[in-house]
């Protein structure tokens, strides 16, 4: 026990010394380091955006425009689930959504911006790696140990969130918004810019939302969030998640449950993570 304590003290001293050496760097040196990390991230996004633009036919026809059709994977699975539970479901998008373009350069600009967004999504792990490389030298050795695999975890959660947004929230949102009507005299003519803005914002929002466990981990580490607080407002959170699911899905129970369940699981995982961090803090206090 004494040997382990001495090793930890030595490790802490070394890490403090490293931090002190880093602190001697001037403010301009830090800015220069940050600038190069940003430049590398931008280059990565640009490279993947260029590839996305080259293969824009595949990205548009196979990925982006797929959710607006009745034969999309989510619609087919919804029908199968309805049959399995004895619940009749007509799926989503009973009518394929038609898109129009108003501006001469509209399709070109939409294609460019879509390629940039695709480049950001694909290069997200590398961007996170650059971000982590910048803040890592400022951490103590024990903090680095606890944050091992942070880039992999954040990237994995982001991609799961993107897929969640793409396969669940996007088709349900399109089905509800495209068929919503205030009067039979008003015909929906959806602009391609409006369509792509909705799809990309939902997908990226899904990716960011799935970073909740990581955010809870860091907030719990610095003492801002506690598992007691999260458990206290669990019911309120469930109601909020149900409201969100009701807004973005058609008015049937099955669709709302499909969207709500992953969000509830994500919230429960966040409580578990906060509780784990809280126990670790208590163990350290007991050792002292």
Image: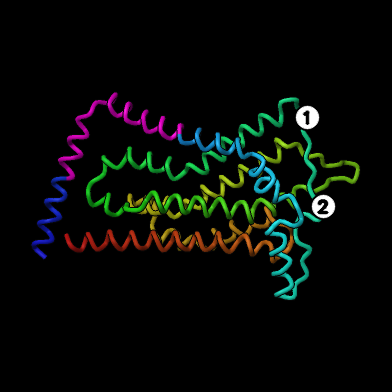
| Residue 33 magenta-highlighted | yes
Which residue is drawn at the image coordinates 64% and 64% (left, top)? 257
Residue linked to disc 1: 102
Residue 48: percent from the left, percent from the top?
A: 52, 38
Which residue is drawn at the image coordinates 74% and 57% (left, top)? 71
Task: Examine the image and state in which quarter residue 199 appears.
Answer: top right
| Residue 94 magenta-highlighted | no
State the extent of the magenta-drawn residues as a range. Answer: 15-43
**C-alpha separation, residue under disc 2 versus residue under disc 1:** 22 Å
Q: Which mark is residue 252?
A: none
Q: Quadrant of the N terminus?
A: bottom left
Asked if 260 appears above or below 40 in the picture, the reply is: below
Task: Examine the image and state in which quarter residue 126 appears.
Answer: top left
Q: Quadrant of the C terminus?
A: bottom left
Residue 54: percent from the left, percent from the top?
A: 60, 36
Judged from the image, the secondary structure of the residue bearing numbered disc 1 is: loop
Kindly report the secondary structure that dominates the magenta region of the rendered protein: helix
Asked if 117 appears above or below 152 in the picture, the reply is: above
Asked if 186 appears above or below 170 in the picture, the reply is: above
């Amino acid at each position: 026990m004494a040997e382990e304590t001495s090793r930890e003290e030595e490790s802490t001293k070394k890490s403090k010394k490293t931090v002190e050496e880093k602190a001697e760097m001037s403010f301009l040196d830090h800015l220069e380091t940050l600038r190069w990390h940003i430049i590398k991230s931008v280059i990565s996004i640009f490279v993947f955006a260029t590839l996305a633009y080259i293969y824009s036919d595949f990205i548009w026809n196979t990925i982006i425009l797929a959710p607006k059709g009745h034969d999309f994977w989510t619609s087919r699975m919804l029908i199968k689930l309805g049959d399995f539970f004895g619940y009749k479901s007509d799926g989503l998008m009973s009518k394929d959504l038609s898109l129009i373009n108003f501006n001469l350069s509209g399709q070109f600009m939409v294609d460019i911006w879509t390629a940039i967004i695709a480049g950001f999504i694909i290069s997200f792990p590398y961007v996170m790696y650059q971000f982590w490389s910048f803040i890592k030298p400022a951490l103590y050795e024990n903090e680095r140990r606890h944050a091992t695999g942070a880039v992999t975890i954040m990237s994995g959660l982001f991609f799961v969130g993107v897929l969640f947004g793409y396969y669940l929230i996007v088709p349900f949102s399109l089905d509800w918004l495209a068929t919503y009507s205030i009067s039979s005299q008003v015909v929906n003519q959806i602009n391609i810019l409006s369509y792509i803005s909705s799809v990309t914002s939902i997908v990226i929002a899904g990716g960011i939302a799935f970073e909740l466990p990581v955010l809870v981990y860091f907030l719990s580490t610095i003492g801002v969030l506690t598992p007691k607080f999260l458990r206290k407002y669990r019911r309120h959170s469930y109601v909020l998640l149900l409201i969100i699911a009701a807004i973005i899905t058609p008015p049937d129970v099955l669709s709302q449950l499909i969207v709500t369940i992953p969000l509830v699981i994500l919230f429960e995982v966040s409580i578990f993570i906060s509780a784990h961090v809280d126990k670790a803090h208590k163990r350290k206090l007991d050792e002292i």
